[in-house]
Image: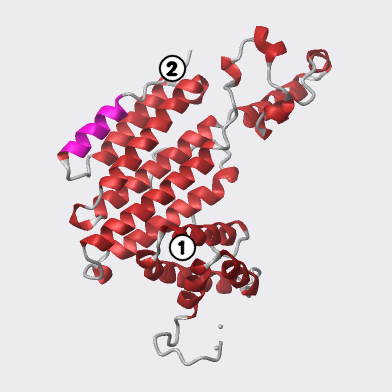
Amino acid sequence: EWTGLDLPEYGQGTGLLAWMECCSLSDSLRSTMLSCLSLDRHRPDHVSMFSKGLLVALTQTLPWCSISQWARLLGVLRELITSARLNVPFSLEYVDYLPLLDLRQFSCELRLSVLLLRVLQFLCGSSCSNWLFCDGWAHICRLYAYTVRDIMNCVKAKLPLHSPSAVPASAAPNTPDSTDLTPSVKAAKIDHDPVKHAEDSPQESEDAHMEAGVHTAPSQEVLFVLSQLFCHVQHIQVMMPGGQSEPLFLCSLEILSHYEAIMAAFPDSCSYVESDNTRHFFSTITDNLNNQHMKAVLKQKIAQLVSSAA
């Protein structure tokens, strides 16, 4: 209609598929497609219909994308999620307790991970079971592994430079210039006058302390996001047919390595009880793997997730 051309391979109901394929071709065409997208965000039925259609179109597009094309589509998905045009409910299927955390700054990463889990559930389901050969599944694994690392990099970039509890008071004069600090650390340094805080009321002091904690210690939130990412990768690795799961196994190891490093760098991010619960939870998830070697290696890595809290 989206050209006036006679394209027999695109019939009724394939508009979103064609739109996504255009988004993947070049950066300029991607920008054009996003600017031409007309969607009333005030109409929940429109957003819901668009989101369901895009999920199906993404399932059809993923297996045929090159790395560069898939990278462009990831940018499209992030833009649609952050602009509230793509609705991806975040489910609590991999949460064994309600975390008292502020996850709003990780909303895009969590929703993107859930969206790709849904896409892979479609691809690995009975309706698509004979759609791809072994090489096709291996390609999908590589694209998904690329995505997981991209999400991990975005999540890690939101960590402060140092743990507040790891920096002694005597080191204060040698702290980096404010231009070298991440926004979260700079926010904590603003108005940090001990005399002024001594004059505050107890409630004001407590509120200021809580606010500073939120800004300077998002490591708990990062650990939660990494735990969700680990569970999603494990879920997909179990579903993946034909034994094409080595890239996902390596991703799982990488997630656990980052998890361990953050626990060490930010001792207050996880208590002994919480780390014990995490090891048990991760081990339970890993029990679903069929490959005994991968399972043993992952469990060995999980066993190293021990809290260093004082």
Task: Determine the main secondary structure of the stretch shown in magenta.
Answer: helix
Residue appearing at x 81%, y 19% in the figure: 200
Rounded to the nearest whole Å, what is the CA distance between mark 2 and mark 1? Answer: 42 Å
- Amino acid beneath label 2: Ser
- Amino acid beneath label 1: Gln
How crowded is the residue under tag 2: few (<14 C-alpha within 10 Å), some, or many (20+)?
A: some
Specify the quadrant that holds the N terminus.
bottom right
The answer to whether one can see residue 90 in this image is no
> Residue 116 is drawn in which quadrant?
bottom left
Residue appearing at x 31%, y 54% in the figure: 141
Residue numbers of the magenta segment: 293-303
> Residue 293 is drawn in which quadrant?
top left
Q: Position of residue 256 (x, y in %)?
A: 37, 33
Question: Left of 125 or right of it: where is 112?
Answer: right
**Position of 63 relative to 246 (above/below):** below
Question: Left of 274 or right of it: where is 128?
Answer: left
Query: Which residue in the structure is indicated by mark 2?
Result: 308
